[in-house]
Amino acid sequence: MKYITFICLFVSSILPLLCSCSEHDDFKNEFRKPASIVLMSADDVDLSHEATASFEFRVNPSNARFNYDVNSPDCEIAIDKVGTNKNLTSSITIPECYSLVKVEPVCDEQGLPKAGQYRAFIKDSGISYSYRDVVSLVISVGGINGDKLISSEVFNVNYSDNVLFSFKFELSKNKGKILDDIELNIDNDEITLVTPRFFDLKGLVPTIETNGKYVFANGVQQVPGVSSVDFSNTVTYTIVSSVGARRDYKVALSNTGLPIVVVETENHSPIVSKEEWLANTSITIFDVDGSIDYQGTSDNIRGRGNSTWQAPKKPFAVKLDKKAEILGMPKHKRWVLLANWLDRTILRNDIAFELSRMTGMDWTPRGQFVEVILNGEHIGNYYLCEQIKIDKNRVNIAELKADDVDDETITGGYLMELDSHFDEVNKFMSSVRSFPYMFKDPDEETLNEQQFAYMQGYVNQFETELYNADSFSNRTYINYIDVDSYIQFFFVNEIVSNHELGWPRSTYMHKDRNGKMKAGPVWDFDWGTFSPDRTQKWISRYTLYYGRLAEDPQYVARMKELWNESYPRFLTIGDYIDSRVEELRQSQEINMEMWPITEVINGDESLTFDEAVERVKTSALDKIKWMNTAINNM
C-alpha cells in the first residue's frame, strides 16, 4: 500500500511537467512560424493587361519558416482582398482579377538570401480593365489552437492602363532648344528637372512611353514624339486608359538661364596639370538662347591657380586658337574659368570687380557666369573671365619685344605680380620692403637681362624715394607711381576687407612705356573677404606702401577727393548684388549640391544662399559707410 501511494504521488507530481514539456514543444514549433508581416515596398501596386508587378516584405522573426511555394497545395501565403478594413479572421477572399504567382527570397549583392526578406509577384489575369482593390498579404499559421492568419498592413492593387513609363527629349526632335538628349525621372507622378541643357522651354517635343490609349497636355490631346508643348510653366500630362481611367503627371522644367561652355578634350583626356596644355580641345559656347557664341576645335586648356588647384572643384585656364569675342567681351585668346569653390555666394570676385569699375580704374576684368560641361559631364557653375594680359582690350600698355632695349622702349610695358608664392621664372625681391615682384609680361621667352634690370631698378628706386626722409618730404616718389591708381586699388581691397595685401598675394602692378607704375588690375577675392568682423576697422591701411603714403598730407587730400567722388556709386553695390542673385539662383543650387564646401574659410559655408548673399551685401555696405567717416576724418 505504501508503494502504491508513493507511485501515485510520483505520477501526480511529474504529470504537470510532462504536460508542460509537450506545450513547450508546441511553442517552439509555433515560434518558428511567422509572427508578423511587414511590407517594405507596396504603397501601391500597379498592373496593366496581363502584366506582372512585384513588391518586398519581411517576416518576423527573421528565422521563421513557412511554405511560400504558390504551386504547392500546402502553400501558406496568399493575397487577401479585404476591402477597406484589415481582415484578421480565418477566411480569405482571393481576388479574381489578379493572383499571387510567385514568392522568392531576396538576396544580397553576393547572391545570399537576406534573413526574413521576400519578394512577392502579382500578375493581372486579363479579365478586367478596371479595378482598385484594398488587399493585404496573409500567412496561415498552424498552432496548438488550430489554423489562424497573420496579416500585413493593407495596400492597393490598381489596374493601370494609364501609366507613363518614360519621358525624354531627343536632340533630333528639338534642335536648337536642348544641348543633347535628356531623359527625365518620374517620381510619384511628378517630373521635375532643372538643368542647363535646356536652351528654350517653348515648343519642346517630348518623346514618351505609355500603356495608355490617349495622352493630353494641359487638356490638349497629343501625338507623342510629334506634338510640341510650351514648358515655360508646369504642364499637366494626363494619360487615359482604354476604359477612360485618367492619371495625371505634373511636369516642371527649367534651365539655369546661363550660357553654357562645352569642353571636349582630345580623347576625353582628363585635365590633371596646371603646367601642361591639352591641345586639340574643342570648345563651344552657347548663349542663353541656344545660339552658338563661339566654336573652336583647336583650343587649349589646363588647370590654374595655387591653393585653388588643390580644391575638389578645379579652375581652368583657356587658350583659344585665335582671338575671339566671348559673350560680348572683347577679343582675346586667353581666358579663365574661375571655380569659386570656397565662396558660398559665388559672387565675391564679381562684386569686387564691379567695385573696381566704380572707382574708374583703367581696366578691370570682365566676366560672365556660365555652366560648364566637360567631356559630357556637367561640372557646375563657373565664372568665365578675362585673364590679366597686356592687350589693347585689357591692360592697355606697350608690349615689349626681346630687342626693346633702347632708352625709350625699355621703359615699358611691364606687368608685375606681387605674390608670396614667388613661383614665376623671372622675379626679384624689392630692396627696401623685400616685396616679391614677379614678371607676368614679358614672359621668360621675351624678357632679357636689360629689361629685367631696368624694372628691378625702377621698383627699388621708387621704394628708396618713398622711404628716404628727405626725398619723401619733397614728394619725389610721385615721379614713379600713379597716385590715383594706388588710391583706387586701395578702395577696392579695403571695402572687401581683403587681407591678402598683407603678405601679399595676387597683387598686380603695371608700367607703360614712358609712364609711371600703376596699381592693378584687381584680382582674386573668393576667400577671406566681405567679413562682418572687419567692417569697423582698417584691413589694408598699413599693407604694401599705404602706411607710408598716408603720411603725405597731399596724398590723403587726394584720397578724400577720390573717395567722395566714388562714394555715391559705392552705395549702389547692394542693388548690383540683388540683380546678380536672381540670375544665379537656380544655378547655384545645382552647383552647391555638386560641390559642397568642406572647409570653413569665409564663415558662411553653412548658410543658405540668400543668407550668405545678405551677409556679403551687409558687410560691403557697412564697410563703405565706416570708410566714409574714417577717410574724411584722416
Image (spheres, helix red, strand yellow):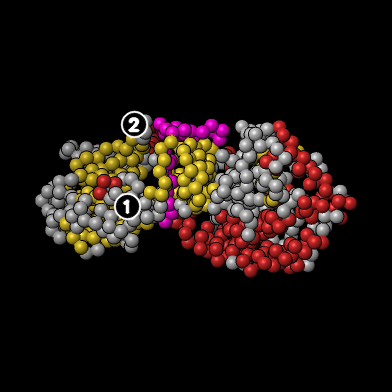
Quarter-wise, where is residue 485 in the image?
Answer: bottom right
Which residue is at a point 70% across and 64% down the rendered structure image? 563
In screen coordinates, is 591 left or right of 275?
Answer: left
Q: Point out the stretch of residues depicted in magenta.
A: 256-283
Q: In this view, does 417 lie above or below 473?
A: above
Q: Is residue 289 above or below residue 423?
A: below
Q: Nearer the viewer, residue 18 or 44?
A: 44
Q: Can residue 65 be seen in this view?
A: no
**Residue 111 numbered mark, or none:** 2
Q: Mark 1 points at which residue?
A: 177
Which residue is at a point 82% across and 50% down the rendered structure image? 466
Inter-mark Cα distance, 2 to 1: 45 Å
Labels 2, 1: front one: 1
Quarter-wise, where is residue 264 in the image?
Answer: top left
Residue 236 image point, x, y percent: 27, 61
Location of the N terminus by quadrant is top left
Does the magenta portion include 265? yes
Does the magenta portion include 63? no
Which residue is at a point 69% across and 51% down the rendered structure image? 519
Dot 2: element = loop
Q: Residues within 10 Å of mark 2 (few under 14, many from 20)?
A: few
Q: How crowded is mark 1: few (under 14 residues within 10 Å), some or many (20 or more)?
A: many
Dot 1: element = loop
Q: Which of 7 and 97 is in front in this view?
A: 97
